Image (cartoon, grey):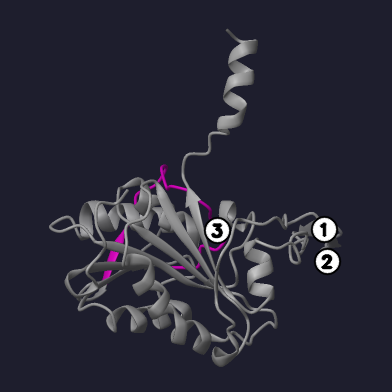
Amino acid sequence: MFERAIDLKKARILLTNDDGVEAPGLKVLEKVARGLCKDVWVVAPELEQSGAGHSLTLHRPLRVRKLAPKRFAIDGTPTDCVLLAINKVMADKRPTLVLSGINGGANLGEDVTYSGTVAAAMEATLLDVPAIALSLQILERGKPRWDTAAKHAGEVIKRLVAQPWPKHTLINVNFPDVAPNRVSGIKVARQGRHKIGDQLMERTDPRGRPYFWIGPTRAEDVGRAGTDLAAVTEGKISLTPILLDLTNKDALAPLRKVFS
C-alpha cells in the first residue's frame, strides 16, 4: 500500500496528458488541480500523442521546452514526459501525485492498453508515485462536456487520495457524456471489453493505392453490470483500479505442472 493518504494542501502535483500541452482537457485539469493544491507542475507532450500507449522514445534525443514557470513541453510521448518530469524537471522534489488527462474521449475496456493518458499514469506508478488517469466520454463529435469533468474531478480526486490504495496500482477515471447535474453517481467498476479496430475501412488514394482507417470499437460490455462501460452508459463516473502486474496467477500452477 502507499503508506498514507495524500494531504493535498502540502502536495506537489504533476499534470500530463496525451492530447498535447495546449489541449483543452489539460487546461480543465490544471484549473481543478490549482483548486486543490498550490504546487502544480505541467509536463506534457509538445504534440498530440493519442494511442501512443506505454511507448518510450529510444532512438532520438528528447528536447524539453520551458513555456513558463512550472510548465514544460516535451517532444515525446506521455511516458517520456513523466519519466523526464520525475527524474529531471522535478528532480529536486518528486511529485506527490500525478494526474493524467483530462483526455478528450473515454478510456474504457481495452482502451487502457492503447491509451497514452493511462500510460502516463502507469509510468508514474512504476516510479512509485500515485497516479490517476482521467478521461471524458464524448459521444457526439465536437461537443465535449468539459463542464461535467470540471465540476466532478476535484471531488473524485480528493476522495481517492484521502486513503491509501494498493501499490503498483493506478486509478482509471472516466466521466460520462452527460450534463454536470445529470451525473448519477460514482461506480467502482471492473474493466469491460470493447475491442477497438476490428472494422477496418479500406479506401483508395488519387494514385490508385489502397489505404486503411482503423474503425470504431465494438460495444460488448455496455450493458453488462459491473463494468466501466456500463457505468458511463448509466451516466455514472467510473473508477477502475488497474494493477501493473499482468501475471495471470490462476495459470501459474497448471503451467508449472507441465514444465516441472
Q: Residue at x 25, y 51 (%)?
A: 3
Closer to us: 122 or 235: 235
Q: Residues within 10 Å of mark 2 (few under 14, many from 20)?
A: few
In this figure, which residue is indicated by the disc labeled 1?
199
Farthest residue, direction left:
92
For discs 3 and 2, the disc positioned in front in the rendered view: 3
Closer to us: 259 or 89: 259
Instruction: Let me know if residue 183 appears in the view.
Output: yes
Q: Secondary structure at mark 2?
A: loop
Q: CA distance from mark 1 to mark 2?
A: 23 Å
Q: Which residues are magenta?
A: 47-66
In this figure, which residue is indicated by the disc labeled 2?
206
In this figure, which residue is indicated by the disc labeled 3?
115
Q: CA distance from mark 3 to mark 1?
A: 19 Å
| Residue 68 % position (x, y) | 23, 77
Q: Residue at x 74, y 62 (%)?
A: 224
